[in-house]
Image (cartoon, rainbow, N blue to C red):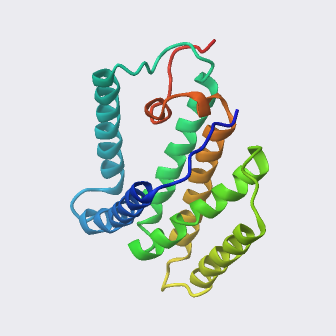
Amino acid sequence: MAQDRKPLDLAAYSLMVLLTALWGFQQVTIKVIAGDVSLIAQAAIRSIVATALVLAWARLRGIPLFERDGTLKAGLLAGFLFAVEFVFIYGGLAYTNASRMVVFIYLTPVLTALGLHLFVPGERLHPGQWLGVLVAFAGVALAFFNPGKGTLIGDLCGIAAAVFWSATTVLIRATRLAQASATKTLEPTFKESG
C-alpha cells in the first residue's frame, strides 16, 4: 500500500525543523506547569483541544472522517498506540527532566526508519542510512548510560513513548491508512469500515 513520495524541498525541511522545535519545547512547557496543572489534566486538555481542532478542520475543508473505507481497525489501533505513547510521555515527565525526555522521544525517527524498512516495501534503508541509524542509536545509548539523578524510570518511559510513536507511524504507512487523508489519520474512525 505504498504511496508515491515526493522528495522534500526547502519548505518541507523548514517546516520539519519548526515542528520539531515546537514539539521539543512542549516537554519543557509540560514540566514548567506541572505544579499548577497535573500531567493527566494537561494530557486530557491537549487531547480534547486537538480533537476539536481536527474535527473543525475536517468539517471546514469537507474532509470525510467517518466513511466506510476499510480503515476502522487500523485507525482504532493507531489511536490506541497514540494514546499509550501519551501515557508514557506524560507519566515519564514525572520521573525525568524535559531535556532527557526529548532526547528519548526523538529516537522515534530511527525506530520508524527501521520499522518501515521491515514492513513497507520501497522503504528499504541504504548503507549510508544504516550508518545514520547506528550513529543515532549511539547518541541515545550515550544519553541513557549517562543517567541523571533518579531519571531511569522517566528515561525508560521516553524510550517506550518513542517505540509507540514509531509503531503508530509504521502502522499508518503499512495499512489502508496510507491511502487515507492526512486529516483522517489524525482522528480514529468510529464507523465500521467496508
x, y percentage for residue 182?
Answer: 47, 35
At horizontal 47% and vertical 17% (from top left) the residue drawn is: 66
Does 158 sit above or below residue 137?
A: above
Q: Is residue 21 left or right of residue 1?
A: left
Of residue 154 and residue 59, the one placed in the foreground of this image is: 59
x, y percentage for residue 47?
Answer: 36, 41
Q: Is residue 97 visible?
A: no
At horizontal 66% and vertical 80% (from top left) the residue drawn is: 138
Q: Is residue 75 left or right of residue 9?
A: right
Query: Which quadrant is the C terminus positioned in?
Result: top right
Does 129 sit above or below residue 166?
A: below
At horizontal 47% and vertical 64% (from top left) the residue drawn is: 92
Query: Which quadrant is the N terminus positioned in?
Result: top right
Q: Is residue 87 left or right of residue 23?
A: right
x, y percentage for residue 123?
Answer: 72, 50
Of residue 188 and residue 93, the one placed in the foreground of this image is: 188
